[in-house]
Structure formats: C-alpha cells, structure tokens
Amino acid sequence: MKDLKLLKLIGGVSLKRVSSLILLVVILGACGQQNNCSSEERHESVIVNIEKATFNEEYIILTLPSVENLNFLDKTRDELIKLAQENDGAYYHLSQEKYEELGLKIGKRIVGYYCDVGESNPPVLFTDKIEVISQ
C-alpha cells in the first residue's frame, strides 16, 4: 500500500514535469516560427486610410490595390472599408517607429511583403517589410 502511494506520487510529479516540458517546447516552437518566412507574398497597394490604435502605439493602415478613377478622399471610413472588401484591399498594422520611419501618408503607393494573413475582411497582412514606391 505504501509502495502504491509512493509510485502515484512519483508518477504524478513526473507527469506534471513532462506536461510542463511539452507545453514549453510547443510555446517556444511557435515563437520561433513567427519570423521564419520561406516564401513571402507581395501586395502592392495605395494607402487610403490611416488610424492610430487607441490600445497601443500602432498605426492601422487601410490599402486598396488600385485607386484609378476613384476619389477616395471624400469617402467615409466605412465606405473605404467596403471598397477594400470588394477590391482585394488589406490592412497593415505598423509600429509607430516603422510608420514614422517610412513617412507614410494617404495616397502613397506601397509594397508589403507578407507571410501570414489575419482572418478579417479586409484581411490583415502581417509584415515588417514595407517599401514606399511612390509619393
């Protein structure tokens, strides 16, 4: 009886340690994969709306692939979102530092290279690599 209690105690401690180790490996593996991008997609678009997030120091950039024959300056935020949903537009979330470094403004044409897409409509393209290609 005493041996059975000791075995359960040892087995319970080992199981907790093994479970903790597995959880740690999974978390570290997921964190390590965030910046590994074997094939980046390219998304060229024009900035049509910029907002500063209220919950952190990020900027939310709404883009459209093409704005030819479209006066987007007189559109409301909701109208721009609807246009982006219908025309393969996308959001980018950028740190304040990256936003200021690139000097982004409404009307600038950019190229974003992304590996992951958020499930929203329009989608969020996760990237740290954006190039300004026209003023």
Image: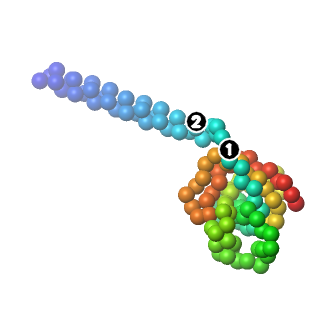
Please tell me whether mark 1 sits on a helix, a strand or a loop.
loop
Q: Which residue is mark 1?
A: 40
Residue projecting furthest to the left: 1
Residue 104, quarter of picture: bottom right
What residue is at 60 percent from the left and 53 percent from the top?
117
Q: Nearer the viewer, residue 59 or 77?
A: 77
What residue is at 80 percent from the left and 66 percent from the top?
106
Q: For mark 2, does the 10 Å Cα neighbourhood hold few (<14), some (14 to 19), or many (20 or more) residues? A: few
Tell me the tag on residue 50. none
Please tell me whether mark 2 sits on a helix, a strand or a loop.
helix
Measured in 3D between alpha carbons, the distance from the residue under mark 1 to the one under mark 2, in whole angstroms, is 17 Å
Name the residue type under label 2.
Answer: Gly
Residue 6 left/right relative to 29: left
* Place of residue 91 in the rendered image (x, y in percent of width and height, measured from the top left): 67, 60
Q: Inspect this view and state whether residue 73 appears.
A: no
Residue projecting furthest to the right: 135
Q: For mark 1, does the 10 Å Cα neighbourhood hold few (<14), some (14 to 19), or many (20 or more) residues? A: few
Residue 73 vertical placement versus 12 (above, below): below
Q: Quadrant of the image for the N terminus?
A: top left
Q: Disc 1 vs disc 2: which is toward the camera?
A: 1
* Place of residue 10 in the rendered image (x, y in percent of width and height, measured from the top left): 27, 24
Q: Which residue is mark 2?
A: 32
Residue 46 left/right relative to 127: right
Name the residue type under label 1.
Answer: Glu
Q: Inspect this view and state whether residue 34 appears.
A: yes
